Amino acid sequence: MRHTFIVLLSAVCLFGSVRPTAAQKTIPTVTIMLSSTGELESDLEAIMKMGGKDSEEQWPIIQAILPAFNAGIDPTRPIRIDIIFGKVRDYRISIPYDNQKAVLGNIHGFIGGKKPRRIGSGLYALDGPAFKGILRDNSKIKYVIIAANKNNIPANFNPLPDLKPLLGAGYDLAASVKNTSEGVDDRKKAITDLREELLGGLKKADDESDLEFEIRTLGLVYQLEELERLFADSESLVIGWTTDAAKKEARMDLELTALSGTDLEQSISALGAKPSLFSSAAKSAKSMFFGSVNHDLDEMRKAHLEELLTLLTGQSVAEIGNSEKIANDHKTASKDAATAFFEMLKAGSVMGVFDGFADIDYGDDGRSIVGTIRAADGTKINGVLASLKTAGWDVELAVVAASVEPEKAEDAPAGEAKTEKDDVEDSEQDATEKADEQAESVEESVSKESVSKESASKESASKESASDNSKKAAEASVTTEEAEPTAVELAIHKVKVPAVGQSDFQNLFGEDVTLLVAGTSNGVYYAAGPGAEDRLRKAVAETGEDESKNDGTFIEIRAKLGPWLEYLKERRERREEGQDLSKLTKEEQSARKERAEIRDMAIKAFAQGQDTIHMQLKSDQKKVTGLTAYAEGILRFVGRAIADVAATKLQ
């Protein structure tokens, strides 16, 4: 997790290159802008007002300490920070001033040591324990520019022209970068240096196996390869933050553009180009989380995924073999189940897309979930579950009449109509056989899911015991590529969550620890909680690509935070039942109390509504655009949190 964060942070800090000047070759650089200290102060005041009367009353305390940070700074003009990735990383900070003496004194206060010493016309040496470098005073535009390396502050440097697009977009805070095709080698070298730094710092943990360490290392390598393409082939990246007091919301915008003719451009063009198989999936009326993804997998990503799944298969098999919690007579079937599961995922990666959705609802009867993931052949999950049953899991395999091909339905003798019940019995008798044999026996019963309604009714008449299941199957219909609605023989299996995971499962979805699972020819579906079967059947029935609903979105997430915090509070209380909290140290008790207070503060803030976060990523030709919107309730909580700090720490 730590290295993932470093890679993401580096993705921001490594983008871009300044345009070459006569004395300076292309150097990877990122530019950060704060629109003005005045705008920042205005936003803070607006956020605290959203927190309510008590929060607003703490604003004068916050306002009183701000001069200690912005003395001498012009509150109407932007501050610019450039992170320059030369042989030695440097930071160039451009600060507007309305009082030169005050701003020099302010800078001295931050770096400590000696006062800024004049060493030339408009040049000062900075020598303090916090920073050593050069300050240039551009009195014509009233900016002081600071850097460690004098060469990064040319006499004619003006920080303002490059900021015009960001200011024009109305961003309060933004990071902007530009690339040219001439700077590719410099950017790749920057990634190479980062790769050496991060991989060189990887160490195998004491409790980590060689295979686990290999998987962790490989994950970092994949991230760096993605970053290299993103970094080397990008033309521009803009990330902007806006606090909109009038609309009572905050937004973070993203825009990524690829250089023409690059691998990145091809990758971006494929994102969201085809509609999701689950285009009609939508969040429920009382959804606390909805997430959908329709992400293209190019050749590099497919190779990464296949290699990773192969390693994960080996890791799972090894862990099962070494486990003391799994009985020896169950280990073979457990290994078979793990292998079959990862092989199913590996087969799905060949399709070249990661497609699926999940929706968690907090209805009056309790929380529930439904979700799915696209698969090359989702019915292979039947074999996985058969192996788990053999391995001792509590699995109830569905009993569903077998589908037959329409042209053979009329001629099939009644006595030869095979049911999934027969296959389940066979799989239990052959419990020691390999997972592929178990999968084959189960899949035969549901190998052809789509049959005509006429054929389904004829088979139902030939085998009366299957009539009830046929009626259920007729309720779930999908539209195939042949564009004819057909009945679906849907095998919905019931899996009891193992004891080790039951507590968390019950905290979220109630006392029933049953997970429903179903596989179709193109997906694996799952559901749990109140109304799970109805939600699962509805998801199957709505499956199908819909070009009219495809706007290029390839990732979308909506979350309502209030219900999540209520759930976390319930889980904490449930876990603490029967615990002797008096045994906690003073530090632990203090931390527990502080977490509870913050959680309760957030719950109260979100109870007033507008507690949603919405994130969306879209692709449009060679450009990716993104938006994350934070509703008023989120800002309301932030305002109350700032006010709490002012009341308890700053008075």
Image: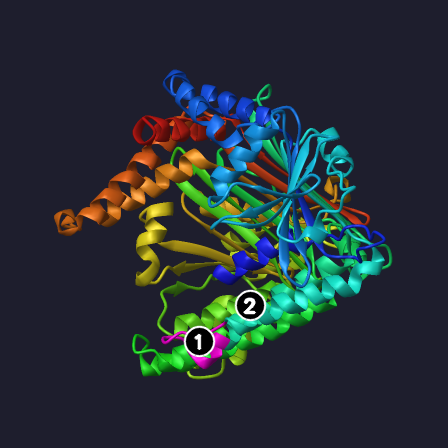
Element under label 1? loop
Most common SS among magenta residues? loop
Label 2: few (<14), some (14–19) or many (≥20) C-alpha neighbours in 10 Å? some
The spot of residue 156 in percent (x, y) is 79, 41
Please identify the quadrant where the C terminus is shown: top left
Q: Nearer the viewer, residue 104 or 448?
A: 104
What's the mark number on residue 147? Answer: none
Amino acid type, callout 1: Lys
Does residue 21 appear left or right of residue 421 in this picture?
right
534 over 53 or under it: above or below: below
The spot of residue 286 in percent (x, y) is 48, 33
**Residue range highlighted in magenta:** 202-213
**Residue 414 seen in render:** no
Does residue 481 appear left or right of residue 630 in this picture?
right
**Residue 629 seen in render:** yes
Amino acid type, callout 2: Leu
Contact check, label 2 and label 1, Cβ < 8 Å: no
Label 1: few (<14), some (14–19) or many (≥20) C-alpha neighbours in 10 Å? some
Does residue 550 appear left or right of residue 393 in this picture?
right
Residue at position x 56%, y 72% from top? Answer: 199
Which is nearer the N-term, disc 2 or disc 1?
Answer: 2
Residue at image mark 1: 204
* CA distance for labels 2 and 1: 13 Å
What's the mark number on residue 198? Answer: 2
Residue at position x 47%, y 48% from top? Answer: 533
Is 534 inside the magenta-drawn segment? no
